[in-house]
Image (tube, helix red, strand yellow):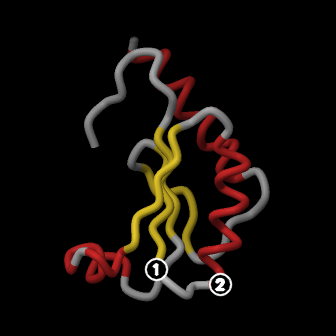
Amino acid sequence: MPRRQRGAPPVVVLYTRAGCGLCERAGRLARREAGRSEFRTVDVDTDPALTRRYGVRVPVITVDGVEVAELELAPGQVRRAVRVARRSARRRA
């Protein structure tokens, strides 16, 4: 994944599929914990490559391209990953 521009918020992506109850719960928690980060949702079934990559292991959550959770999301997991991504971006700047 390309580097974010300096000062841009981390990008949190939820890889999901329609009708996935775990995905819905993880999405609600991840959205809350993402704070001011950019939040995107990607349906893996819209792209054959993503369907092959993620198979049945959705939801998968990434922060700036780094997988931070799959299947279940623990409270605080996204918040911590966003904090790490921000610190890492500051060090690279």
- Residue 37 to residue 13: above or below: above
Side (left or right) of 13 relative to 23: left
Q: Amino acid at mark 2?
A: Gly
The one nearer the camera, 47 or 90, is: 47
Q: Position of residue 1 (x, y in %)?
A: 28, 43
- Residue 84 to residue 7: above or below: below
The one nearer the camera, 51 or 17, is: 17
On the image, which quarter does residue 43 sit in? bottom left
Q: Residues within 10 Å of mark 2 (few under 14, many from 20)?
A: few
Q: Amino acid at mark 1?
A: Arg
Q: Which residue is mark 2?
A: 21
Mark 1–mark 2 CB contact (< 8 Å): no
Q: Position of residue 4 (x, y in %)?
A: 36, 28
Gap in Å between the C-alphas at discs 1 and 2?
A: 9 Å
**Number of numbered discs overlaid on the protein picture:** 2
Side (left or right) of 43 relative to 62: left
Q: Which residue is mark 1?
A: 17
Residue at (55, 87) in percent of width and height: 19
For label 1, the SS is loop
> What is the quadrant of the C terminus in the image?
top left
Residue at (50, 68) in percent of width and height: 60
- Residue 82 to residue 89: above or below: below
For label 2, the SS is helix
Q: Residues within 10 Å of mark 1 (few under 14, many from 20)?
A: many
Q: Position of residue 53 (x, y in %)?
A: 29, 76
Residue at (70, 62) in percent of width and height: 28
Residue at (68, 66) in percent of width and height: 73
Q: Position of residue 61 (x, y in %)?
A: 52, 60
- Residue 93 to residue 20: above or below: above
On the image, which quarter does residue 44 sit in? bottom left
Name of the residue lying farthest toward the right: 75
Label placed on residue 32: none
